[in-house]
């Protein structure tokens, strides 16, 4: 689809006047018409240009690029618009991910990134450590992975559940041999508990948490070294249990399941390189 220059003009007017209503008044047009024309421009370019709020608008990174290009001669502007379309379909450019520490250490996540970068060597992948929900549009992230206990900052974002997981209490045999048998959560009061921010709320308030860390590998290793009882996801303790380095504590006591959620801004303007990465996450998990 070709870009309508009238739509581009209304986009520039909207930015210069600081909002759709102001641009409508300045151009003697209905607000709904400008809003519709802006949507058509975004559809033609295949990307979101504006973040609309009740009182104002904000430019996305693509919106800023387009507004900057609009001051150039028409030939350069047309070249820039062509690049926009190519970026949506080509496997090049940058992909930005916001990932918690705990997910970064999972073998499944390493497999996804290794496979993706092997398939598409021309794509630059940027991975940032974020434990809480980020504003994907304003901070220019393409995807985020979060445990379901974390509230997503924008309800309009797409949230896809990748998998359900459960956490267990684990400790080394050597550590447990120093204490009387643990038969109930009441018996945990005299023990050092090690956990992360997402699981801390599941631990009864009368129990003392000695170490809380986002690094689940650290917690697992501390438990293996006899430094306490770790409350961590099964995925981070399964191999150590199979090797006899850790054993389950209160194995019949079940805590609520968590879900691992994949979050992305919109299903409408997704470039092909992001669609492929989302599919990889779904297949792997």
Image (tube, rainbow, N blue to C red):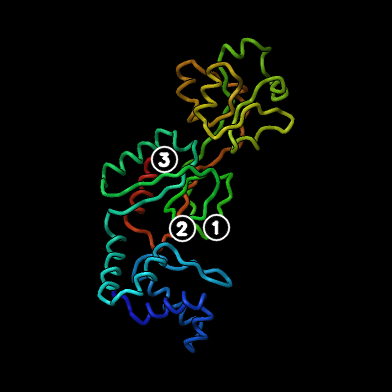
Residue under the image location 57 percent in, 38 percent down: 257
The disc, 3 or 2, on the residue closer to the chain's N-terminal end is 2
Q: What residue is drawn where x is 26% and y is 49%?
A: 122
In the image, is 61 to the left or to the right of 149? Answer: left
The N terminus appears in which quarter of the rendering? bottom left
For the C terminus, the quadrant is: top left
Nearer-the-camera pick, 279 or 61: 61
**C-alpha span from label 3 to label 2:** 20 Å
Task: Point out the tag, 3 or 1, that comes first from the N-terminus.
Answer: 1
Residue 170: percent from left, percent from top: 57, 22
Q: What residue is at 61 percent from the left and 25 percent from the top?
A: 252
Compared across the picture, whether 121 is left or right of 66 comes to: left
Q: Hey, which residue is sitting farthest right in the picture?
A: 206
Give the label on residue 154, or none.
1
Q: Which mark's residue is nearer the viewer, 3 or 2?
A: 2
Contact flag, marks 3 and 2 (Cβ < 8 Å): no
Q: Are marks 1 and 2 in contact (CB under 8 Å)?
A: yes
Density class for disc 2 (Cα within 10 Å; few <14, some 14-19, many ≥20) is: many
Residue identifier under label 3:
285
**Distance (Cα) linking label 3 and label 1:** 24 Å
Q: Is residue 33 above or below residue 108?
A: below
Which sits in the foreground, 17 or 21? Answer: 17
Q: Which residue does the numbered mark 2 point to in the structure image?
A: 265
Cα distance, mark 1 to mark 2? 9 Å
Q: Is residue 250 above or below residue 103?
A: above
Foreground label between 3 and 1: 1
Residue 157: give x, y in percent of width and height: 50, 57
- In the image, is 209 to the left or to the right of 48? right
Q: Position of residue 203 (x, y in %)?
A: 66, 32
């Amino acid at each position: 689809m070709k870009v309508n220059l009238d739509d581009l003009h209304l986009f520039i007017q909207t930015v210069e006047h600081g909002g759709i209503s102001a641009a409508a008044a300045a151009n003697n047009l209905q607000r709904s018409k400008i809003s519709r024309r802006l949507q058509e421009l975004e559809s033609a370019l295949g990307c979101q240009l504006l973040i609309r709020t009740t009182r104002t608008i904000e430019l996305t990174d693509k919106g800023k690029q387009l507004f900057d290009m609009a001051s150039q001669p028409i030939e350069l502007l047309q070249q820039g618009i062509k690049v926009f379309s190519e970026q949506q379909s080509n496997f090049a450019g940058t992909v930005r991910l916001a990932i918690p520490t705990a997910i970064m250490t999972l073998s499944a996540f390493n497999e996804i990134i290794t496979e993706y970068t092997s398939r598409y060597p021309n794509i630059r992948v940027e991975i940032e450590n974020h434990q809480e929900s980020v504003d994907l549009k304003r901070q220019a992230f393409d995807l985020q992975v979060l445990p379901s206990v974390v509230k997503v900052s924008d309800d309009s974002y797409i949230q896809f559940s990748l998998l359900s997981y459960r956490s267990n209490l684990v400790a080394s045999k050597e550590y447990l041999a120093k204490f009387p048998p643990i038969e109930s959560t009441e018996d945990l009061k005299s023990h050092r508990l090690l956990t992360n921010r997402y699981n801390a709320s599941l631990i009864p308030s009368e129990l003392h948490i000695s170490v809380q860390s986002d690094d689940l590998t650290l917690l697992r290793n501390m438990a293996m070294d006899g430094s306490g009882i770790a409350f961590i996801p099964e995925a981070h303790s399964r191999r150590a249990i199979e090797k006899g380095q850790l054993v389950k504590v209160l194995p019949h006591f079940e805590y609520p399941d968590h879900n691992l959620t994949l979050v992305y801004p919109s299903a409408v303007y997704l470039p092909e390189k992001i669609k492929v990465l989302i599919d990889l996450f779904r297949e792997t998990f």
